[in-house]
Image (tube, rainbow, N blue to C red):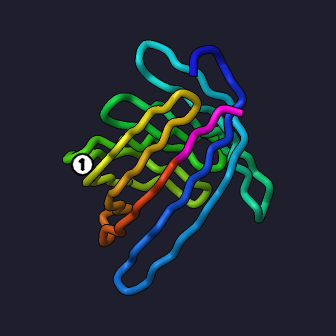
Amino acid sequence: MAAENNVLITMIAHTTDGNEKDTTETIYPGKGYEKDGCYYVFYDEVDPEDAKVTKASLRIRPRHIDIRKKGAVNTQMVFIPGQCTETEYQTPYGKFILTVDTKRAEIRKREKEIDVELDYRLSLGGAQAIRNQMKIKVAEL
């Protein structure tokens, strides 16, 4: 990816909370470009219940990734393998501390595609951590 391009972002998330497992897949159109060794991707998330829009962005670096959201939800999650990061997670219902414990972040770049695999634990407001595995595919259109 060189100049700003139209991209398709596919996210597949597997969540494990005790014995309960859930899988979701979402697909977003967006824009992406490369600058200074980082890949930036921008897209809109629309809440299916109330149609509120959250502006989202990914900053994909060689060894870690940042996910920012601004709108109905405001946060900046940082995924660095082997590290715990904390951030504020602001929702219409209040502000919480979100802890991200990243076990693995693999980033593979091809000519017109970037694949990211994340394995991490999320804890919201000190609650028990929930295991998450996410695959993100950013493909140029």
Image spot of residue 83 (x, y percent): 21, 46
Residue found at the far bottom of this picture? 19
Instruction: Name the main secondary structure of what is drawn in magenta.
Output: strand
In this view, 135 is above or below 43:
below
Image-based side of 14 in relation to 7, left or right = left
- Identify the amino acid type marked 1: Cys
Q: Give the range drawn in magenta.
A: 137-141
Nearer-the-camera pick, 73 or 46: 46
Q: Quadrant of residue 119?
A: bottom left
Image-based side of 80 in relation to 135, left or right = left
In this view, 84 is above or below 58:
below
Which quadrant is home to the C terminus? top right
Residue found at the far right of this picture? 51
Image spot of residue 58 (x, y percent): 52, 35
Residue at screen point 31% across, 68% down? 129
Residue at screen point 39% across, 77% down? 17
Nearer-the-camera pick, 49 or 82: 82
Residue at screen point 40% across, 61% down? 133
Q: What element carries label 1?
A: strand
Residue found at the far front of this picture? 111
Residue found at the far left of this picture? 82
Judge the density around disc 1: few (<14), some (14-19), many (≥20) Cα neighbours within 10 Å: some
Query: Which residue carries the number 1 mark?
Result: 84
Q: Does the magenta-highlighted stretch encompass residue 16?
A: no
In this view, 129 is above or below 120:
below
Image-based side of 112 in relation to 20, left or right = right
Count every numbered label the image shows and give the total: 1
